[in-house]
Amino acid sequence: MTIRIGLDWGTSSLRAWRIADGQITDARQFPLGVRKIAAGTHAQVLHEHIGDWINEAEIIIGAGMVGSTFGWYEVPYLEMPLGLDDICSKAVEVPNGIKRSDGSTLPVKIISGVKKNSAGEFDVMRGEESQVLSLGIEEGTVVLPGTHSKWIAIKGGKIVDFRSYFTGELFNLLVKESSITQAISEGKHTKTLGNEAFIAALKTPGSELTHEIFATRARWLMGGKIDDNREHLSGLIIGAEIQAAITHFRDKHVHIIANVELADIYEKALAEFGISATKIADSLTLKVFNRTAELA
Amino acid sequence: MTIRIGLDWGTSSLRAWRIADGQITDARQFPLGVRKIAAGTHAQVLHEHIGDWINEAEIIIGAGMVGSTFGWYEVPYLEMPLGLDDICSKAVEVPNGIKRSDGSTLPVKIISGVKKNSAGEFDVMRGEESQVLSLGIEEGTVVLPGTHSKWIAIKGGKIVDFRSYFTGELFNLLVKESSITQAISEGKHTKTLGNEAFIAALKTPGSELTHEIFATRARWLMGGKIDDNREHLSGLIIGAEIQAAITHFRDKHVHIIANVELADIYEKALAEFGISATKIADSLTLKVFNRTAELA
């Protein structure tokens, strides 16, 4: 039996999979984002949390911010177009790997991120490329909503374009750190509450965003409820993302990779713009892990 | 001789003027924004800083956030259209005023703010209405750039419309509190540095703002200098304000009220959109103070 370990090691968490003969047989998740890991201690962290897998595995493949300047080992950004084999064949081996208990070395490879640097356009991603290429989609647009939402275009099985949006981080900054904080509840999105305000805000022109952010405070001063205001602000910012993205990515159907709650919100929002969605609760990045191991 | 005291008491500072027979004869400024003043201590703060004026004055007129929920005494928002006399005749007297040294009472009046609450549009201002009406403009658009930039339309000597933009606060949040902080210098705007990046960013479509904010980090990862990146981000956010505002306020010439540095930046930015500007280094709000006193 061939045992591989796959890691999606991002800014906020470490997710690890045990892969036996190409199939996932175990999964673990820890709140140990790469920014929390001191330089030089990544191998030790893995020993503490998946040490039992390390002794039996043949290779570790890591994707995500683990390959960034503040990760374990910095690997370059690749340029598009990029298919599964392009990404997997260019995984970079971490010097010295990890020592198994018997003193032998377990090799560790990290998947490169993707950059765009042409015609005055700049963008980067690390990790999303592996999630998306593992879906095996030949043509289409994939949306990964979140702190820095990504929209990714695929043609002929290759990533040919992508754009990031500051959506989740902007929302959190405004809710937690700004002068409109008191006008907005901190509560989580609910399915029942505020969806009317959310939907109503989606089509506010994105070009008016900084005006509308200020107006959130005015709404509250004039009697707007803080729960509604939260949904309204969320609708403004997600709406601005969708409006900008759909002028660029013109598909009428997209694939959403997100947890169930966020996927539902985006599905509902996209429907307001006439766009249907296939929801993918999670992307295990399995294809990228397996293919990288095969090509190693 | 008639002595009046005018106050522009805002979120970040207290500015006070001694007005003798309608003319300013002294001016003082303190970093004592209303949010720093404990409830019930406003009269005391004034005694400490302009006590000599209080004993000789006949009235104090205050404009700005001093009339807000977290100010000295909350006064209502008025609805447009609003001319000088509309604003001044509706100033609200603070109960009990301030005691002079001889035990007599000095009356204090606070100018109301302005609100917009129609057709789904919400906005508020406090203080800017007094600055603008004191200019004595009959027709035109006035721009007050800053933390929450205001654009104000005047027709027939009355304020008929206004819009706020979250410009300065958004910029500061991103520079100081966000994931792109390390990609941007904290230094002040300079006249020599970065203006090319600033100008180049102005016309980026405002609808792409949340994408472009993220891209600031990508620019830096690909070798962009943090000083240029700061100017670029500033250009993006000020450009988004100007683009949105000029589709609403269609004047080809505007009046800018701001300190010299910020007025120069906005003049330069507006010129890129074919708009000329008259710069007003400061608005003393003198007309509003005098007219309110006359109508008291």
Image (cartoon, coloured by chain):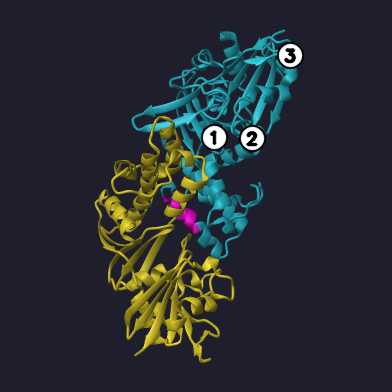
Chain colours: A yellow, B cyan
Q: Is residue B86 above or below residue A10?
A: above
Q: Earlier in the sequence, mark 2 or mark 1?
A: 2
- At horizontal 39% and vertical 83% (from top left) the residue drawn is A4
B211 within the magenta span: yes
Q: Main secondary structure of the magenta part?
A: helix
Q: Is residue A226 visible?
A: yes
Amino acid type, callout 3: Ser
Horizontally, is A4 left or right of B98 in the view? left
Horizontally, is A72 left or right of B161 in the view? right
Quote the CA–CA distance across marks 2 and 1.
17 Å
Amino acid type, callout 1: Ser
Q: Position of residue A176 (x, y in %)?
A: 49, 47
In which image quadrant can residue A248 be found?
Answer: bottom left
Q: Is residue B115 above or below residue A48?
A: above
The numbered dot on residue A173 is none
Q: Earlier in the sequence, mark 3 or mark 2?
A: 3
Q: Which residue is mark 1?
A: B276
Q: Which residue is mark 2?
A: B259
Q: Residues within 10 Å of mark 3 (few under 14, many from 20)?
A: few
Task: Write the start and end of the magenta stretch as one range.
Answer: B208-215
Q: Position of residue B203 (x, y in %)?
A: 48, 48
Report helix, strand or loop for mark 2.
Answer: loop
Q: Chain of mark 3?
A: B
Mark toward the viewer: 2 or 1? 2
Amino acid type, callout 2: Asn
Split into 4 quadrants, where in the image is the C terminus of chain B? top right
Query: Share a chain, discs 2 and 1?
Result: yes
Q: Which residue is mark 3?
A: B101
Q: Chain of mark 2?
A: B
Query: Share a chain, discs 3 and 2?
Result: yes
